[in-house]
């Protein structure tokens, strides 16, 4: 069992926790929370695989479904404890986008995508699950807000490509690149860093 495979499973579980917690906050029942956790966990990776002309990995590997159910279980049983932690949803989401971004870039390069396309697909892997989650819950997706979200993923994806060119080992590269995504995301939330808004508001 490779390190990348374990990281991908961990990222899937973390995103399932994130999606289920968001559903719990909306007072959605357990089935709805499970569905939201599932869509959040597989949305970005499935879109990436479609672009790569691959069958989504969770279709053939039941371990992905098991870790999604485990994530939903954790969020349901320990929901009150997790909810007491400051910015819990942001914390889990930041971990998830970091893992998914790095794994998405690596898989895209493995299947002979160009480096530029791999950066885009890495970003898609990371953010599209959250976009789907927020859309289902009638929230404005983070990618459409001023927050630094997709930009953090692009930074991590670019770093992965650069380190890959420098022949850094894939497991080390994945850890470093996903950590950069996580750090940028958490710091931007903590200190309220945002991107500039183009144009003016029309009331």
Image (cartoon, rainbow, N blue to C red):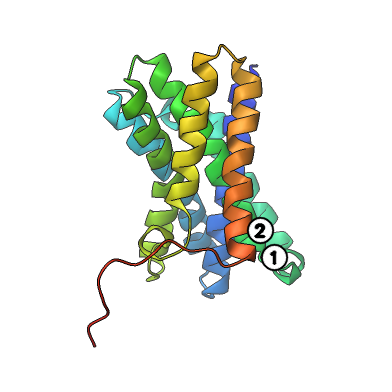
- Badge 2 crowding class, 10 Å Cα cut-off, few under 14, some 14 to 19, many 20 or more, is many
Q: In this view of the protein, which residue sits in the foreground, 95 or 18?
A: 95
Picture disc at residue 75? 2
Residue at numbered disc 1:
79
- At 39% from the left and 32% from the top, the residue drawn is 119
Q: Is residue 109 above or below residue 20?
A: above
Residue 69 seen by the camera:
no
Number of numbered discs on residues: 2
Lateral position of residue 118 relative to residue 181, left or right: left
Q: Is residue 16 above or below residue 108?
A: below
Give percent across and percent down for residue 106. 48, 23
Q: Is residue 84 above or below residue 2?
A: below
Q: Is residue 80 above or below residue 187?
A: below
Give percent across and percent down for residue 6. 64, 27
- Badge 1 crowding class, 10 Å Cα cut-off, few under 14, some 14 to 19, many 20 or more, is some
Give percent across and percent down for residue 202. 22, 83
- At 32% from the left and 19% from the top, the residue drawn is 113
Element under disc 2: helix
Element under disc 1: helix
Give percent across and percent down for residue 189. 59, 63
Residue 99 seen by the camera:
yes
Q: Residue furthest left?
A: 202
The quadrant in which the N terminus is found is top right
Q: Residue furthest top?
A: 167
Q: In this view of the protein, which residue sits in the foreground, 170 or 203?
A: 203
- The quadrant where residue 110 appears: top left
Tell me the distance, in whole angstroms, between the alpha carbons under discs 2 and 1. 5 Å
- At 64% from the left and 64% from the top, the residue drawn is 190
The quadrant in which the C terminus is found is bottom left
């Amino acid at each position: 069992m490779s390190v990348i495979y374990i990281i991908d499973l961990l990222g899937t579980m973390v995103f399932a926790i994130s999606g289920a917690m968001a559903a719990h906050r909306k007072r959605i029942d357990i089935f709805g929370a499970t569905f939201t956790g599932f869509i959040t966990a597989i949305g970005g990776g499935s879109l990436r695989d479609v672009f790569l002309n691959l069958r989504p990995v969770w279709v053939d590997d039941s371990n992905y479904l098991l870790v999604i159910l485990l994530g939903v279980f954790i969020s349901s049983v320990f929901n009150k404890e997790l909810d007491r932690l400051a910015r819990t949803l942001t914390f889990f989401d930041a971990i998830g986008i970091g893992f998914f971004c790095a794994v998405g870039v690596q898989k895209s390069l493995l299947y002979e995508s160009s480096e530029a396309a791999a950066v885009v697909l890495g970003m898609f892997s990371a953010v599209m699950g959250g976009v789907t989650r927020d859309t289902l819950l009638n929230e404005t997706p983070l990618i459409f807000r001023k927050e630094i979200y997709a930009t953090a993923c692009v930074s991590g994806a670019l770093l992965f490509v650069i380190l890959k060119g420098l022949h850094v080992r894939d497991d080390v590269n994945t850890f470093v690149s996903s950590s950069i995504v996580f750090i940028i995301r958490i710091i931007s939330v903590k200190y309220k860093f945002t991107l500039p808004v183009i144009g003016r508001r029309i009331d």
